[in-house]
Image (cartoon, coloured by chain):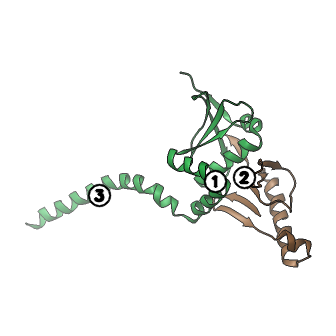
Chain colours: A brown, B green
Amino acid sequence: MLRVMSRRGDDRVTWDQQKVLEGDTEAIAAVREAERIFAQERAKGATAFRVVQGKPIERIEKFDATAEQIVMVPRVVGG
Amino acid sequence: MNLFTQVLTALGWIVIALAVSPMVWLIIQPYLKGWSPAERRAMHLLRDMLTPEQFRQLTWRGYLEIPSHVEPRRVYRVPRTRGYVQVIENGHAIMRLCVQPVECLPDADLVVLHKLMIEANEEAYLQKANKYLCID
């Protein structure tokens, strides 16, 4: 699942990794959409984190379709 | 009661209502904000990101404490509503940090943002933050 923080709360794109591996067109389309949003947000300066329950949070630079959850936060500045 | 008195009474009530309404708004505003779809979604994300203990701490104490990976006696105290993140060492506030997203986010999302950034890369977070030293 990809979760992108915004003023609306978080926007989500979900996909089933198993169905992606089986070649399901809908699941593949969802992954492609998530990948597009990821690249778009990264270009705007957003930071992405891979969140896996029970594991340390990890900052990622590239989209990971196998990640349980990716959370993207907008660019931050010192206030 | 003549008409003049009635008009004066009505005007009096209007003045009182106008004087009280900003105070009433200040009191109820946080509750109304919590009903917005954005805040509800952000709260959902927050619940997913925190352990039950962390969520309880945030609810009852008004802040979330995130232990430092770099300095064992240090914790970062993230407020539930927008504001400075306090750096606590040995039980004393030594610094306040200000880090803001360029986009306006719901309060619950801000807590998640600080948590993710501190836990993933504390040094980068500190580099980005504006620091205000606390002097006793």
Percent of width and height locating residue B91: 57, 29
Residue at image coords 73%, 43%:
B119
Percent of width and height locating residue B107: 58, 52
Q: Is residue A56 above or below residue A19?
A: above
Label 1, label 3: how many angstroms apart (C-alpha)?
35 Å
Q: Which residue is mark 3?
A: B17
Query: Who is closer to the viewer here, A78 or A2?
Result: A2
Question: Quick one: label 1, few (<14), some, or many (20+) residues within 10 Å?
Answer: many
Q: Do the numbered discs 1 and 2 sit on residues whose CB atoms are within 8 Å?
A: yes
The residue furthest top is: B136
Q: Which residue is mark 2?
A: A73
The kind of secondary structure element at disc 2 is strand
| Res. B12 image quadrant | bottom left
Mark found first going from the N terminus, 1 or 3: 3
Question: Quick one: label 2, few (<14), some, or many (20+) residues within 10 Å?
Answer: many
Q: Are marks 2 and 3 on the same chain?
A: no
Q: Are marks 1 and 2 on the same chain?
A: no
Q: Which residue is mark 1?
A: B109
